[in-house]
Amino acid sequence: MSRRTPSKIALSLYGLLFFVFLYAPIVLIVIYSFNANPVNMMIWDGFTFDWYRAIFGQSTKISESSLYVESTSQLYAAVRTSLMAALIASTISTIFGTCIAIAVYRFRFRLRGLYRALMYMPMMMPDIVLGISLLIFFVSAGISLSTVTIIIGHCTFLVSYVFIVVSARLADMDNTLEEASADLGASGWETFRRVTLPLILPGVVGGWLLAFIISMDDLVITYFIAGVDSTTLPVFIYGMLRRGIKPEVNAIATMMLLFSIVIASGGLYLRSGRKLRK
């Protein structure tokens, strides 16, 4: 039986404190979303589901003056805008990111390293700089701010995330399988459809899920390029926070957290199921 040296104890304590620092704020958001106190979130006044009922437009014990969502229709419109923008932007980004990753991996061309570095730039660029740049571009081009500009703006940086995820999958791929397919007389398209795509599909699905979650949660860039009638859920929550952090805001944040966990769990399940079938 190995002895627990002071260094191992200190390392374990550091790891525990790190996870507490990382997840304690999230746990507090979930806990205080059930706080019945409508005035001060930090003062516990009993357990209630009224804030969740208010989000879904159901009757509650809380007076109307204590509610901070002006109308559930505005909240639902923000959710619809976020879902539509995330679905379209993540799908477009996955298609382009996958094609670019395959092209960079398969072909050798001049300035290949520079091209790969440029694909990382949208990820490293500060969100506020990218948001202002996109706003100036849309205004200069005479494009009205709307859901379309949100989708275009999200695609500019989501492609980079998909590119990295798919590139990592391509790096682990066995090239001899493609060579064997070509030796057996398969065309380039057949090789891609029957060999390459199934091999990199977990990376493609993972890239799509990552892009979808990032698009749903983006605030800074969306704040600059969203139109008056195209408010997303993060922008809507930011507007609510101007009047203070209330339990109703915590309830919405908790539901977004739960939604993100479900999406991430679905991606892990698909990947594990694919591995088991193999």
Image (spheres, helix red, strand yellow):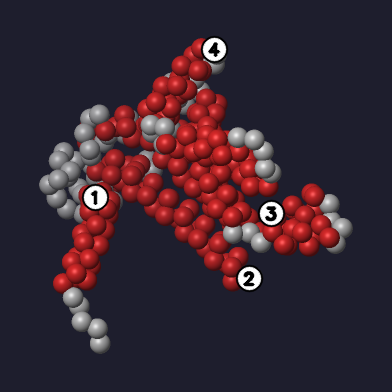
Q: Is residue 198 left or right of residue 215?
A: right
> Across the whole image, how many numbered discs are drawn on residues?
4
Q: CA distance from mark 2 to mark 3?
A: 16 Å
User: Residue under circle 1?
Assistant: 25
Quarter residue 96 falls in:
top right
Percent of width and height locating residue 239: 31, 29
> Who comes first in sequence, dot 1 or dot 3?
1
Amino acid type at mark 4: Gly
Amino acid type at mark 3: Leu
Crowding at dot 1, Cα within 10 Å, few <14 / some 14-19 / many 20+, comes out as few
Element type where label 1 sits in the image: helix
For residue 197, which numbered disc appears in the image?
3
Quarter residue 274 falls in:
bottom right
Choose between 174 and 41: the one closer to the eye.
Answer: 174
Percent of width and height locating residue 262: 45, 55
Q: Residue at x 37, y 50 (%)?
A: 257
Element type where label 2 sits in the image: helix
For residue 142, which numbered disc appears in the image?
4
For residue 277, which numbered disc appears in the image?
2
Percent of width and height locating residue 213: 46, 45
Amino acid type at mark 2: Arg
